Amino acid sequence: MEDAAHNREYCLSILKDYTKSDSLLKHAYAVETCVRAYAKKMNQDVELWGNVALLHDFDYEMFPTAEQHPYKGSEILEEKGFDEEFRNTILSHAEYTGVKRETILAKTLFACDELAGFITAVTYVRPSKSIEEVEVKSVRKKMKDKAFARSVSREDIINGAEQLGIPLDEHIEFCINAMKNNKKELGL
């Protein structure tokens, strides 16, 4: 039997046990899509990377406070047999945990998390509500509009690209293209 960290069906069942909101499920899939694309580009473990991204917010709906998320999720994943590196990567995606992002996976998860949500929000305000209409310039323009998707941290988007060592426009374009390639599952 493959380990939990490499079993997408198992990870998906955990996600769906804890997350009922369609928007949170789609967020998990969007982040997973971007992180998997980076794993492929960097010749990394696509299954592992994808599953970390899939589960990064699985506890958020039940435990939405900074005191609980992602700590409760880490406890649950430990009980389910996920190793410390998997759990620490998830813990590191939230700035306030103080868990350092030392691996390329941790940096990639952080870089893709807010951006995937922001690209989704930009898609929803396009006339066709299709990701096919989303371009880097439209994402950059919306980033300047503080009232738009105000819960998304522009600072995290910018810092995420910096931590990956990728120019912001290139990072945005890469994530848009990854999401275009999975638009059906993402509902975009």
Image: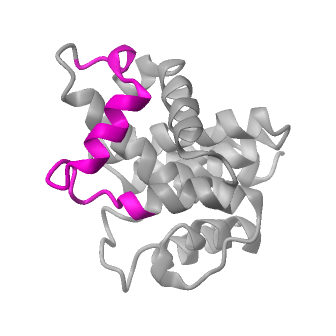
How many numbered discs, if any? 0
Residue at the spot 19% in from the left edge and 55% down from the top edge: 146
Q: Is residue 143 magenta?
A: yes
Residue at the spot 83% in from the left edge and 43% down from the top edge: 44
Image quadrant in which the N terminus is located: top right
Comparing 74 with 42, the one in front is 42
Residue at the spot 48% in from the left edge and 29% down from the top edge: 176
Q: Is 50 left, or right, of 181 in this rendering?
A: right
Q: Is 98 left, or right, of 8 in this rendering?
A: left
Q: Position of residue 61 (x, y in %)?
A: 31, 61
Q: Position of residue 184 (x, y in %)?
A: 42, 17
> Is residue 83 visible to the viewer in this orientation of the structure?
no
Image quadrant in which the C terminus is located: top left
What span is colored magenta in the figure?
A: 129-155
- Asked if 49 appears above or below 102 in the picture, the reply is above
Q: Is residue 113 magenta?
A: no
Q: Is 175 left, or right, of 21 in this rendering?
A: right
- Asked if 183 appears above or below 144 in the picture, the reply is above
Q: Position of residue 182 (x, y in %)?
A: 51, 21
The quarter of the picture where residue 164 lies is: bottom right
Comparing 75 with 180, the one in front is 180
- Asked if 168 appears above or below 182 in the picture, the reply is below
> Is residue 1 visible to the viewer in this orientation of the structure?
yes
Residue at the spot 66% in from the left edge and 47% down from the top edge: 166
Q: Position of residue 91 (x, y in %)?
A: 57, 73
